[in-house]
Image (cartoon, rainbow, N blue to C red):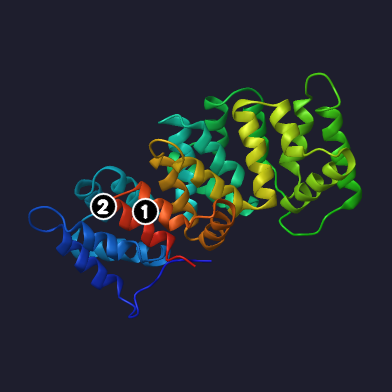
Amino acid sequence: MSTLSFPPVPTSPRDDAVALYRAFKGLGCDTAAVVSILAHRDATQRALIQQEYRTMYSDDLIKRLTSELHGKLETAVLLWMHDPAGRDAIIPRQALTGTKNLEAATEVLCSRTPSQIQSFKQIYHSKFGVPLEHDIERNTSGDHKMLLLAYVSTPRYEGLEVDRAMTEKDAKSLFKAGEKKLGTDEKTFIRIFSERSRAQLAAITSAYHHMYGSSLKKAVKSETSGNFEYALLTILRCAENPAKYFAKVLHKAMMGAGTNDTTLIRVIVTRTEIDMQYIKGEYLKKYRKALNDEVHSETSGHYRTFLLSLIGPNH
């Protein structure tokens, strides 16, 4: 569900390319114009604008944006220029091999559906010349590594049907592997979390609670730690409600002193074309504040305008 508010009159990619070229011309850049065009174009339109720009000016729009924009706005706009699968390839690549942000890599890998993972894995390989698994293998470790490798390479069912008998069996296995024993049998957690569909995992969560009177999330928190724990919780929360998971990630990025702009940009840009309406709803429900208002108070300038344009108006 897209939240992009499109201009009342559909503009042509050619008109947009001309307007962008004009915004770059002369001294300084008309940043407001750049933001007001690009923030209101969907993935197809953005790709067409890039083609037109190259055709008309023999110039690469991405390179041009890189030299004209700066700081957080530059980061956000450049990420936005890709389509969703392209972004989902770029973020883990940078997070694994560049800036070393394992939380960001884990978030993207463990919150995407099996079909999303399939498509960005293909782009990853063709864009960077190595399979995603190769970079996971080299840049992560231990149970975290085992889980990520299993998660990105296991085909999972994406439907809503649930196998009741298997649900109880899995709940029992997880209880035995975690709370019931001294130490933790991580292999069982890795197997079940990487092989079961979202619907199945959500059913396991309620069966677990029903059978043992305690929550599977709490068990994960007390039995595991670090990046492995973060990956398991991401899978679990996204099985139950991805929008609620992302509302929580955004809230955490804006809590306390300072703002984690890397997280803010990553989540807003990657979810705008997927489930931003739902995230806004969950945010309001959980934190009693509108996501727009929170982002407005944590950001400023053209960067603020850009993010707020992507989020779209309050309900």
Alpha-carbon distance for marks 1 and 2? Answer: 10 Å
Q: Nearer the viewer, residue 181 or 159?
A: 181
**Residue 32 occupies quadrant:** bottom left
Name, please, the residue furthest toward the left: 27
Q: Nearer the viewer, residue 170 or 276?
A: 276
Going 43% across and 60% down the picture, which residue do you hit? 311
**Residue 260 occupies quadrant:** top left
The type of residue carrying mark 2 is Gly
Residue 39, percent from left and from top: 34, 62
Quadrant in which the N terminus appears = bottom right
Going 64% across and 22% down the picture, which residue do you hit? 142
The answer to whether residue 274 is seen in the rendering is no
Going 46% across and 40% down the picture, which residue do you hit? 255
Going 86% across and 53% down the picture, which residue do you hit? 163
Pointer 2: what residue? Answer: 301
Q: Is residue 154 left or right of residue 65?
A: right
Pointer 1: what residue? Answer: 296
Q: Is residue 274 left or right of residue 61?
A: right
Please tell me which of labels 1 and 2 falls first in the chain: 1
The answer to whether residue 216 is seen in the rendering is yes
The type of residue carrying mark 1 is His
Name, please, the residue furthest toward the right: 165
Residue 205, percent from left and from top: 78, 45
Q: Is residue 127 left or right of residue 142?
A: left
Q: Residues within 10 Å of mark 1 (few under 14, many from 20)?
A: some
Name, please, the residue furthest toward the top: 182
Q: Is residue 52 above or below residue 134?
A: below
Residue 160, percent from left and from top: 76, 59
Nearer mark to the viewer, of 1 and 2: 1
Which dot marks residue 152?
A: none
At mark 2, the secondary structure is: helix
